C-alpha cells in the first residue's frame, strides 16, 4: 500500500511541483488548501491538484477560526514583533498545520508536507506545530531534502519539470518578489526587495491605497471591545455597523485599506539566524492594535500593563518563531488572558490618509479617577500623601549618594 | 541671615505667587529659569522675578544639553512609556532639577523649591533628582504644604494674592487645559481634557499642523546615525542639511510639524497611582524614534534587540517616574549604551500628512546577509541545516506532547 | 454610638497598649487574634483583651488556610525574596488582614487597626490588603499617628501607660531583638541584631536545633507532589506517613527542625526603602522549597521553567511588599498555576545536620527522555541533527564577528 | 600539503581515537591540552599524543585565566543555572575553545576539532565559540560525523580501533558514569546516573568529603570582596591567609571539600532539548556564591539587585548554552559589571559538615542605614512618611476594587 501524505497546497507552481514530485516518489497525496481569506480560485486549485494526481483535495474555510482563535489573541496581547510586525503570516501557519494534522489523522496518513523554503520562518512554524500536535507524524520538507534540492536548483528546473509533468505554468513572468496573503495581511519579501534600500513601487500594494490616494475626508469610527476582543465596529460617517468577528475584521480591512492604513517596511530577524527585509500591509490589524492599546490605557491596572509590556516581546517572539502550540505559550496566555477580563469599552478613531488617530474613549470598566465616582467619596487624593511617598522612594537614592560620596 | 532657596521659576502666575509667598515667609529667593526651547520671553521673566523681590535670577540655556544628554539617550533606547508617550516632560525635569542643585551649591542655598502639583509626576521627578544629587538639600513644595494649600484653594485665591502683592496677572482668561512645552514636545492635560472622550479642537495644537492642513507633497529625508545618535539630517526635496544635534533636532521639529507628525492622545498611568489623560505633540522625537528603530533593524543583533525590547519598558518607566539619576538607571544604561556601538547608517523616510514612513535604509555596519559579502564566502546558509535545527527545537515539544497524552 | 475598630491583637505589650489607647479615645474595640501556629496562650490573650475593655474577642484558627492558600502557592512558585528569604511573615500578613476585614464587615466596624511599626514591611502588607479588600475601610495605624508617637517615645512610656491602665507587664526584661513566629517560620530582627556583623547566639533559635546538635544519623524522607503541591511525606527511617497539608507541614517542621535545617542570616531590602538585617528559621519551608525545585527539574518544560525563573523575583517581591491581593499578582498567578499542572512525582531527600540533600526522584509526569519510552520509538535523538542546530545558532554570531572586524 | 587541525585533546581514549582517526584521514594534527586544574598527568598526555602522530602538542596552564576571567565573572553575577548548577563545565569550554582558535591562528590551521558528543551541551559551547572568534574556521566534530559514527558504534569499536592503532588502553574497566573535572568542579553524568532515582554511592565523590565524614569542629573563615571579586580569604581557625585569585580559589576548594560543601544532584535542561541528570561537586564555587550574595545584601541598591535577579537566569542560560562570546552576553555584562562597583566588604562564614552559613558581614561600602551615619543627620526616617507612601501605593488597588465591584 502506498504511503499517504497530506500536503499543504496553494495551487501555485511550487506546491504543484512538490505534489507531482511526491506522486512520482510513490506517495498517495492528499492536498489541503486553507481558505484564510487570500484572493484565490479555490475550485481551480482543487481541480489542478486532482488533475496532477492528488487522491483527494480538502478545501477548508478557516477564516472565522483564524480571526477568533489566532488574530484576536494576538490583538489582545498587543503582539508586535520587533516593534513593528503584526505577524499576519506567523499567525496563519499554526492554523494551517493544525488542520493538516487533523486531516492526516482522519486520513490515516503517516506524513505531512509543505513547500516552505529552508531559509525562512514558515518551515519552522509548520514543523513545530506538526511535531507538537502529533509527535509521531513524519515530515517531508522538499526544500530541505538533498535529492529535491539537487534536482531543483532554480526556477528554470521547476518550469522544466512542470512542462514535463503536465503542470500548467502561468505565462506571466516571475514576480519580482514573494508574497503571502491572507485575511490579516499581505507580505512582500525577497527578489528585488532584498536590497534594503530599494523603495517598493506603489503598484506592489494590494490591500491598501497609498495615503496619497486616500479620500480627503476622514472616516470616523468607533470600536467596542469586550474583554479585549473587538465586538462592534461603527462607521460614524455612514452608520455602517459590523458586530461579528469575521465581518468586522473584513470591514476594517476595507475601510483601513481605503484610507491607506497599515503599511510597514522593515528589516527583521528570522528564527533561523538571518535578517530579512519585509514589507507588509495590515489594515484591520493596525487599526485594532491601536484601538486595543487605547482601551487598555483606561481599563488596565498599571502594574499589569507594565508586566505585560515586558512580556509582550517574548509573546510575539513565540508566535514569530513558531511556538504557538507550546508549554511556554500556554504559560504566557494564562496570564495575558487574565489581564483582559475588564478590557472593555469603546474607542473613537479617525482614519485619514494613512493615519489612525485615537480621538476619545469611554468605558464602563474605567479605572480613570474621573470615572470612579466612589473614589472621591473615599477621600480621593490628598496631595500631602505625596510627601511621604516621595521621601520613602528617595530613601535608597539618598543612601547610595551618601555611600558613593564617602 | 535669611535662608536661601532656589526656585524653579517659569514666569507664570503659579511660580510668581510661590516666589512672593516664599519672600513673605522670609526667604531669600533665587529664581532659576531653564531655557529648554519653550516659547517664552526670558527677559520679561527675569524682570518680573526681580520686581517681585528675587535676589537673583538665573536664566540658563540648556537646549544643547537637553538634546544630547537627555533626548538622545531616550532615542537610543527607543524609550516609549506605555507604548506611546515619548516623555518630553519627563526628560526635561531631571535636567532642570540638576541645574537647580548646581545653583544651590554655588549660592550656598539650603533649599530648593518648585511649583509642581501634588498629584502629578513632575514633583517626583524634581524631588528625586534633588535628593539623589544632594541628599542634604531641603525641599519646599508648596503644593504639598498644608499652609499653602489652605491659603490657595483655587485660582481665585491666587489672583487675589497676586493683586494684593503686585504680581501682574494677564487679562486673558484661564486656559481650558494645562500645557508643558519644551524643545521636544508640548503636552496638554487637565481642564476640559479630563473628559477622556473629549476630542481636542484643532486650535489647541501648536507644534504640528493638522495632517489635513499639511502639504500635498511628501518630504523625503535621510537621517544618518552614528552609534545610535542622529548625526545628520538631509532634506532630499530642497537639499537642506543639518548636522549638529540641536540644529538637526529643531529642523526635524520644523519639517515634522509642517507635515503633521507626532500627535498622540492617550490615558496613561502616573507614578502616584492615578490615571491621567494626556495629549502630546512630539514631531522630531517621533521621526527619530521611527528612524532609530529602523536602523537598529539592520545593525543590531537579534538577541540584543530582544533583550533590550524586554527591558525598554523598565527604562521608560524609570524616566517617567523620575529615576533618571538612580543606580538602576546606571545599570540599564551601561547595557543600553553597549548595544548602540554599531547602530550606524542612514534611514530614508517619507513625511506626508501625519505619516512618517521608512522607505529604505543602508549601513556600513549592517548585519544583513546580503551586505556581508564574506558570509557567502564562508558557505552561507545550507538549507539542510534547518532540518536539525527544527528537530532539536521540537524535541521538548514532542516530549511534552507524549507526556501529556499519557 | 461609639465607632467600632477591629484590632489585630497579639496579647503582647504593644497591642495591649494600643487596645487601651483606642478605648481611651472612645472606640469600641473588637480584638482579633489569628492562630497561625505560633506558640501562644490564646485563652489568656482573650481574657486579657476582654479585661482591658475589648467588647469582643475573635480567636481564629487559620493554620490550615495559611498552609494551603498562602504557603503552598509560594512553594509552587519557588518564591524566595532576594535569593534567600522564604517570607514566612510576608505570607501571614495578608491572611490576618483579610480576616480582619471579614470581621469588620460582620461587626459593621468602620475601622481596622494594627500594631506594626512605621518603618517596616508589615504595615504595608496589612494596609494594602485592607484597602484592596475594602476600599472604604478606615485605618488606624498608631505607629504612624502623630499623637500616639508623641505619647510613646520609648518602651518606658509604654510600661508607664501599662501600669497606669492596668495592663499586666511581664516581669521579664525586654528581649534583645524582635521576633515574629508562625507555622512557617520564626524571624529575628532589630535590637542587637541591628549590628550586621553580630553572630546570634545559639540560644536564640527556637524552631531548629543547631546542625551541631542534630542527630548523627541522617533521616531519609520522600515527598510526593501533585500539581506542585506536597501531598505526602514519608519518613523512611521509621515509616511515618503524613498526607494532609497542615499535618505534613508540621511534621516537616518537626523533623527539619531536629535536623537543623532552614536557618538564614541576611541583610534584605524593605519596601519602605531601608535595608534590614534578619535571621530566620524555616524548616518545613526550606525542605519543601528544595524538593519542589527538584521535582520541577524532571517534570517542567525548559522554557516554562526559564520564564518562571525570570518572573519569580517579581512574584516574591509582590509577596514581600504586600501586594498579595493585587491585579498584578492575579496576572502572575494565572501563569504560575498553569505551569504546575504536571509537576507531580516523588523526591527522595536526606536530612542531616543542616543539610537537605536530594538523593533521587521519580515521576509519572517525567519529561526525562529515559522515562518517555515512546520518545525512542519516534527515532529518538539523531546526533547529526546537532550539526544544523549549532550552525544556525552560530549564524548571527558569525555575522556580528564579520561585521565587527570590518 | 596536509591540512592542519587543532584538536582539543585530553589524553583519554576518546580523543586519542579521534587524534588517530584524523591522522588516518590525512590531517596534520596539533593536539592542545588545557590545564584547567584537573588531576591529569600532562607530560604523559603530551607523550601519548606525539606517539600517536601529533605533529605538535600544546599544554597550556590556563588556571589563572580560568579563575579571573571566567569563574569570577560568574560569581559576580550570582550565576546559577536552573536554580542550582554553578556551571563548572560550561565556564571552562569557551576558554578551551578560545585557546584552540589562538593556536589555530598561530599554526595556520584551517580546522579545529573536539571530542564532545552530539547529544550534549559541550559541542555547542565549543563550536559557538569557534565560530564567533573565527567565523572562517572549519570544524570537525567526529561525534556528529556520519562516517565516524558508523565506524564507532560503541566502546568496543573504539577499543578495537585503539588496539589496532597502538593506542594504549587502560586495563581498568569502563567507568559507570562520565566525569568532567577542573578547578571549579567535578561533574558526574550518564551511565548508571541516567536513572534519576539512583543515589550515587559515596565513593564517587572526589572533591568533597561526605558531610558525615567532615570534621566535628566548624571552620570559621572570612572572605573579603572588592568590586564583586574575592580578594582575600582568612581561615580564623588557623590564621591561613590567601590573597591571590587562583590561590584563594584552590584554598576554598580544599577547606570546602574537607567540610563536605558543594554537592548538588539535579535533572537539568540541555540546550539541545533533552533533560539530563547531573551530580556536581563545587566546593569553592559554592562558598563564594553564598558569600558574594551576602555582601551584595548590604552593598547593592535594591532596584539594581531586583533587576539583576530577573536577568541572572538569562545570564546563566547564556553561559550554559555556550554563548559566552556573544553580543547579548556583552550587553548583559556591561550592566552586571556596572552593578559591582561598590560590592566590597567582608563576609564571615562557618563551614561545617556540608553547611556554609553566613554569620556576619561588614563593609565600608554599606548601604545599611546603621552604617550610614550621615543618614540620621539628614533627619533619618519619619514614620509618618509611610502614611502617604502606603496610601499612594494603595490608590490603584482601591480603584480596581471599586471598578470590579461595579
Image (cartoon, coloured by chain):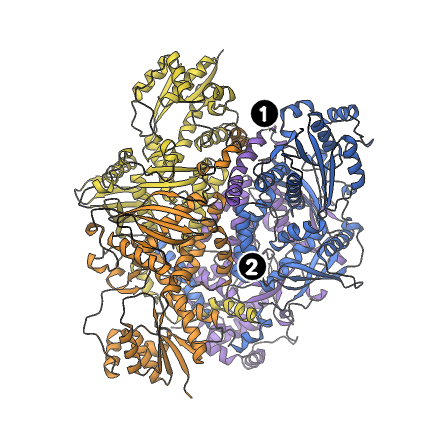
Chain colours: A blue, B purple, C orange, D yellow
Can residue D74 be seen here? The reply is yes
Q: Residues within 10 Å of mark 1 (few under 14, many from 20)?
A: few
Disc 2 vs disc 1: Cβ atoms closer than 8 Å? Answer: no
Q: Which label number is shown at residue A150? A: none
Residue at mark 1 = B379
Which image quadrant: the C terminus of chain D? bottom right
Give the Cα distance between marks 2 and 1.
47 Å
Q: Secondary structure at mark 2?
A: helix
Q: Nearer the viewer, mark 2 or mark 1?
A: 2
Q: Chain of mark 1?
A: B
Residue at 68% across / 49% down in the picture?
A66
Q: Chain of mark 2?
A: A
- Front residue of B39 and D352: D352
Q: In the rendering, at what x and y percent does residue C224 appear? A: 38, 50
Can residue B340 be seen here? The reply is no
Residue at mark 2 = A339
Q: Is residue B261 left or right of residue A306?
A: right
Q: Is residue B65 left or right of residue B254?
A: left
| Residue, far right | A171
Q: In the rendering, at what x and y percent does residue A103 appear? A: 67, 41
Q: In the rendering, at what x and y percent does residue C285 appear? A: 34, 55
Q: Which corner quadrant of the image does residue B133 belong to?
A: bottom left
Q: Secondary structure at mark 1?
A: loop
Amino acid at each position: 500500500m502506498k504511503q499517504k501524505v497530506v500536503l499543504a497546497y496553494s495551487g501555485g507552481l511550487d506546491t504543484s511541483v512538490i505534489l507531482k514530485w511526491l506522486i512520482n516518489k510513490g506517495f498517495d497525496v492528499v492536498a489541503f488548501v486553507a481558505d484564510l481569506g487570500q484572493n484565490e480560485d479555490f475550485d481551480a486549485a482543487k481541480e489542478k491538484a486532482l488533475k496532477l494526481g492528488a487522491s483527494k483535495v480538502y478545501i477548508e474555510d478557516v477564516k472565522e477560526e483564524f480571526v477568533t482563535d489566532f488574530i484576536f489573541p494576538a490583538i489582545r496581547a498587543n503582539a508586535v514583533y520587533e516593534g513593528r510586525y503584526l505577524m499576519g503570516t506567523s499567525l496563519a501557519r499554526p492554523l494551517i498545520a493544525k488542520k493538516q494534522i487533523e486531516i492526516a489523522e482522519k486520513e490515516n496518513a503517516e506524513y505531512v508536507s509543505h513547500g516552505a523554503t529552508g531559509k525562512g520562518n514558515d518551515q519552522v512554524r509548520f514543523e513545530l506545530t506538526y511535531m507538537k500536535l502529533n509527535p509521531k507524524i513524519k515530515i517531508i520538507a522538499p526544500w530541505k531534502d538533498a535529492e529535491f534540492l539537487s534536482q531543483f536548483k532554480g526556477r528554470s528546473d521547476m518550469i522544466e519539470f512542470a512542462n514535463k509533468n503536465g503542470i500548467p505554468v502561468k505565462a506571466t513572468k516571475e514576480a519580482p518578489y514573494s508574497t503571502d496573503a491572507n485575511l490579516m495581511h499581505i507580505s512582500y519579501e525577497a527578489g528585488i526587495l532584498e536590497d534594503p534600500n530599494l523603495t517598493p513601487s506603489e503598484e506592489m500594494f494590494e490591500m491598501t491605497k497609498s495615503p496619497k490616494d486616500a479620500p480627503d475626508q476622514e472616516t470616523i469610527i468607533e470600536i467596542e471591545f469586550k474583554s479585549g476582543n473587538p465586538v462592534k465596529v461603527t462607521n460614524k460617517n455612514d452608520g455602517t455597523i459590523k458586530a461579528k468577528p469575521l465581518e468586522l475584521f473584513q470591514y476594517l480591512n476595507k475601510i483601513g485599506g481605503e484610507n491607506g492604513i497599515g503599511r510597514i517596511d522593515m528589516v527583521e530577524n528570522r528564527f533561523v539566524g538571518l535578517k530579512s527585509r519585509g514589507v507588509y500591509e495590515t489594515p484591520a490589524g493596525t487599526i485594532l492594535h491601536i484601538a486595543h492599546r487605547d482601551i487598555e490605557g483606561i481599563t488596565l491596572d498599571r502594574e499589569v500593563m507594565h508586566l505585560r509590556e515586558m512580556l509582550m516581546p517574548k509573546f510575539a517572539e513565540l508566535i514569530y518563531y513558531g511556538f504557538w502550540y507550546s508549554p511556554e505559550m500556554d504559560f504566557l496566555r494564562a496570564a495575558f488572558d487574565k489581564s483582559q477580563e475588564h478590557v472593555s469599552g469603546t474607542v473613537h478613531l479617525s482614519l485619514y490618509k494613512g493615519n489612525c488617530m485615537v480621538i476619545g474613549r469611554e468605558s464602563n470598566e474605567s479605572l480613570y479617577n474621573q470615572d470612579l465616582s466612589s473614589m472621591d467619596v473615599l477621600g480621593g487624593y490628598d496631595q500631602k500623601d505625596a510627601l511621604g511617598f516621595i521621601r520613602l522612594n528617595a530613601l535608597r537614592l539618598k543612601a547610595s549618594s551618601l555611600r558613593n560620596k564617602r
